[in-house]
Image (cartoon, rainbow, N blue to C red):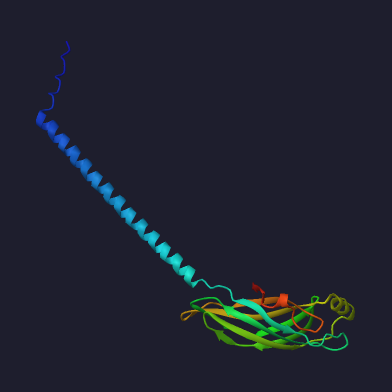
Amino acid sequence: MSSALPSPPPPSHHHVQRLRTLFKAHRVRESLTTRACKLLCSFFLSLLLAAGVILFVLWLSLRPHRPRFHVSSFSAPVLSPSAGTAFSFDVSDRNPNGNIGIFYDAVAGSVFYRDNRVGSEPKLAGPFYQPPKNTTVIHGAVDGASLSPEELAADLRSGRVGFRLELSTTIRFRVSTWDTHRHRLHVSCSVEVGPDGAILAASKSRRCSLYFF
């Protein structure tokens, strides 16, 4: 003969209220913890974003810009295949940076005619320091070799003789008291002169190409 197990008594009203109160308190504590974590994460994300913006602005203001070179003058007074040609020129060198200076080592120069080097000078200028927002004029005089008779005669008939002036040096940028490492700089300027050896108007103030190595 089996006997039925007695059923547990129903929870009292006081016990139910106590459980509800504990559950609500737990939810409140969990909500406060979650809210605090969210606020802390938002604060750190805002801090990182502000730091990133500040670093980006500093990078833009301190990022070195390349110097700009333009041919101011160029002449080859004696254009004759039977005699050497002397070249003289002025090249303007502009430092466009507002807070960055540039140190230049010695500047070497070469003159090319139809891809053949016809004159060179190992030290046209330098070493020198160029302050921010400054323009320096590099003056050069190079004694050249005789030019190819056939090619020179054809160019003289056309009314224009093309040359390529190349400058090479090593530079360092200075930001406040900090210097960057050295950069090998190569400048290439295309110029044309008339039969009298004077630079043509189209070549004056022509911007030169720059290459870093």
Q: Quadrant of the N terminus?
A: top left
Instruction: Name the residue rendered at 59%, 76% in the picture.
Output: 67
Report the residue that reaches farthest toward the top: 1
Q: Nearer the viewer, residue 156 or 102?
A: 156
Instruction: Name the residue rendered at 19%, 37% in the picture.
Output: 23
Q: Quadrant of the C terminus?
A: bottom right
Q: Nearer the viewer, residue 35 or 164?
A: 164
In this view of the protein, can residue 104 be seen by the observer? no
Whether 12 is drawn above or below 155: the answer is above
Report the residue that reaches farthest toward the right: 150
Q: Position of residue 99 (x, y in %)?
A: 48, 77
Picture quadrant where residue 71 is located: bottom right
Picture quadrant where residue 109 is located: bottom right
In this view of the protein, can residue 177 be seen by the observer? yes
Q: Is residue 123 left or right of residue 79?
A: left
Instruction: Name the residue rendered at 58%, 87% in the picture.
Output: 128
Picture quadrant where residue 205 is located: bottom right
Q: Position of residue 123 (x, y in %)?
A: 67, 88
Q: Nearer the viewer, residue 200 or 23?
A: 200
Whether 207 is drawn above or below 197: the answer is above
Q: Is residue 80 left or right of residue 21?
A: right
